[in-house]
Amino acid sequence: MSEPDSLIWAAPAKLNLYLHVTGKRDDGYHLLDSLVTFATVCDVVRIERASALSLTIDGPFGEGLPLTSDNLVLRAAEKLRQLTGVSEGAHITLTKNLPLSSGIGGGSSDAAATLRGLVRLWGIHPGHHDLSGLALSLGADVPVCLFGRSAFMSGIGERIEPVDDLPEVPMVLVNPGIGVSTPEIFKARTGTYSPSGKFEQTPETLDEFVTLLQETRHNDLAAPAISKQPVIKEVLDQIVRSDGCRLSRMSGSGATCFGFFNTPSQAEEAAKTLAHAYPQWWVKSGAILNDVRSLSAI
Ligand code: C5P
């Protein structure tokens, strides 16, 4: 199969449907247990053949992102070149639709889409183990984003256990227009550690899904995040008060929250109402996405 000259990948939002902090390693990283899935709301990564590596960023959240080598997309590309000895470059265009530092793994998903795209563009075959290690070195959420399917995640993010497809629940995603610092939220977490919240059965209906998730502890980072940014509590309350909402939760270290809805039209209606009532909030409707490769980027 010949390699393409350009590729476009969706880099969907990652969601922690529940997130338990189960312990802490000696190096300060926390041990997590989480059911991770994705949403049909995404950044877009376009990759074109070029001799050098370069990046252009556009989109509603493009401003304020560094174009330097700190950028996760460029770091992913650079590390993949080092790992595989490729000398080619690529021109990458990142369309940043997802809010920054917002608990939905935007940067991690962008890095994962970049790795996936460059592997195709450069026609390379890095070993699974090497690529997973590279992903983890970029951030704790990158391995699950690279895996790109609904999964239980544990360790600091490196242990991934696939689950059967989850119901494609209609959803609303809301960010109150604030970025939060992940290390600060982890530092502010107090109290005992949680047991694993993993469940054995795959939910087939929305009712079963909600019941299983309600048996978990929601998100152990929600209390510290709310203590730093009380508006997160208001976001959760406003989502759950919307018609047809079955559950509202925070993702990752916040501040983005999501709600499960009975029907797509109820999710759309709730998104419209919230966006109107809170014009400074980022509000999107969508649905659970079990496989990031199934989402067309354009
Ligand atoms: O890996 P990532 O860059 O997403 O992590 C940001 C910070 O969040 C880490 O430096 C660490 O302070 C904290 N973190 C943690 N345990 C994890 C993931 C992140 O303590 N499993």
Image: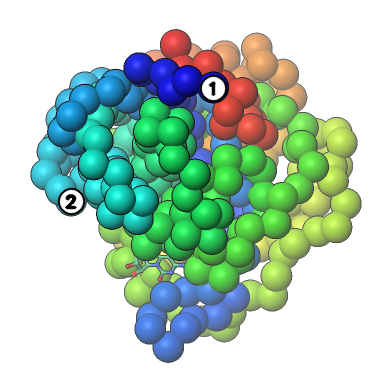
Q: Residues within 10 Å of mark 1 (few under 14, many from 20)?
A: few
Q: Can see residue 274? A: no
Q: Amino acid at mark 1?
A: Met
Q: Amino acid at mark 2?
A: Asp
Q: Left of 148 or right of it: where is 126?
A: left
Q: Position of residue 253 (x, y in %)?
A: 42, 56
As helix, strand or loop, the secondary structure at mark 2 comes to loop
Q: Can see residue 77? A: yes
Q: Residue sitting at 85 percent across and 33 percent down?
A: 205
| Circles 2, 1 touching at the beta carbon (< 8 Å) | no
Residue 71's label in the rendered image is: none
Ligand 1 rendered quadrant: bottom left
Which quarter of the figure has residue 22?
bottom right
Q: Position of residue 37 (x, y in %)?
A: 61, 42
Quadrant where the C terminus is found in the figure: top left
As helix, strand or loop, the secondary structure at mark 1 comes to loop
User: Looking at the image, is 72 positioned above or below residue 56?
Assistant: below
Give the residue furthest to the bottom: 26
Q: Which residue is mark 1?
A: 1
User: Looking at the image, is 78 positioned above or below residue 295?
Assistant: below
Q: Position of residue 192 (x, y in %)?
A: 57, 83
Q: Residue sitting at 44 percent across and 40 percent down?
A: 124
The residue closer to the viewer here, 276 or 179, is: 179
The residue closer to the viewer here, 122 or 293, is: 122
User: Looking at the image, is 179 positioned above or below residue 197?
Assistant: above
Q: Which residue is mark 2?
A: 70
Tag in front: 2 or 1: 1
Q: Residue sitting at 18 percent across and 51 percent down?
A: 70
The residue closer to the viewer here, 64 or 280, is: 64
The residue closer to the viewer here, 232 or 103, is: 103
* Cα gap from disc 2 to disc 1, whole angstroms: 34 Å
- Of callouts 2 and 1, the N-terminal one: 1
